[in-house]
Image (cartoon, rainbow, N blue to C red):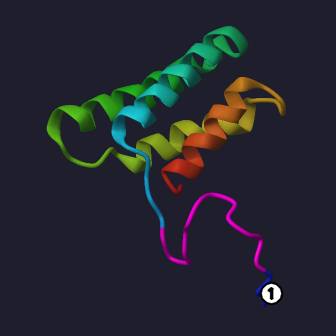
Amino acid sequence: MSTYNFGNVNGPVRFGDRTTPDLETLMEAADRLTEALRAEYPGLVSSGETIQEQLAESAEDGLPPNRGRIRSALETIAIAASAGTASLDYTRHLLHALDL
């Protein structure tokens, strides 16, 4: 196991520290993902809308979003989206942000 110190890449984070972005930030990323899907992969727009719906439901009821539905939708997009597209970039961002 390497103990090489890469420096302060993402701020003062220690091993084990994991912060999930606030719901508003996640909703904004989901909105941008759906916009990108409309332009790049119209057939996948329903997957983007599923993510938006799950995050909106979480905002309404105050409970955590349904990670299973979000994961399934993101995986569907990740399988179809080509490298270098905004759709794949937002998908990766949400996967990482939600630690899926």
Q: Quadrant of residue 89?
A: top right
Q: Which residue is mark 1?
A: 2
Farthest-out residue, right: 83
Residue 75 in sight in this render: no
> At 43% from the left edge and 34% from the top edge, which residue is drawn?
25
Q: Quadrant of the N terminus?
A: bottom right
> At 52% from the left edge and 49% from the top edge, which residue is drawn?
97
Q: In the depicted view, which residue is nearer to us: 21 or 62?
A: 21
76 to the left or right of 73: right
Tell me which segment is drawn in magenta.
Answer: 5-17
Residue 23 in sight in this render: yes
Point out residue 30 in the picture as x, y percentages from the top left corner: 49, 28
Residue type at the position of mark 1: Ser
83 to the left or right of 12: right
Q: Quadrant of residue 91?
A: top right
Q: In the depicted view, which residue is nearer to us: 49 or 18?
A: 18
> At 80% from the left edge and 87% from the top edge, which residue is drawn?
2
Whether the magenta-drawn stretch holds residue 47 is answered as no
Note whether 39 is above or below 11 in the view shown: above
74 to the left or right of 28: right
> At 53% from the left edge and 36% from the top edge, which residue is drawn?
73
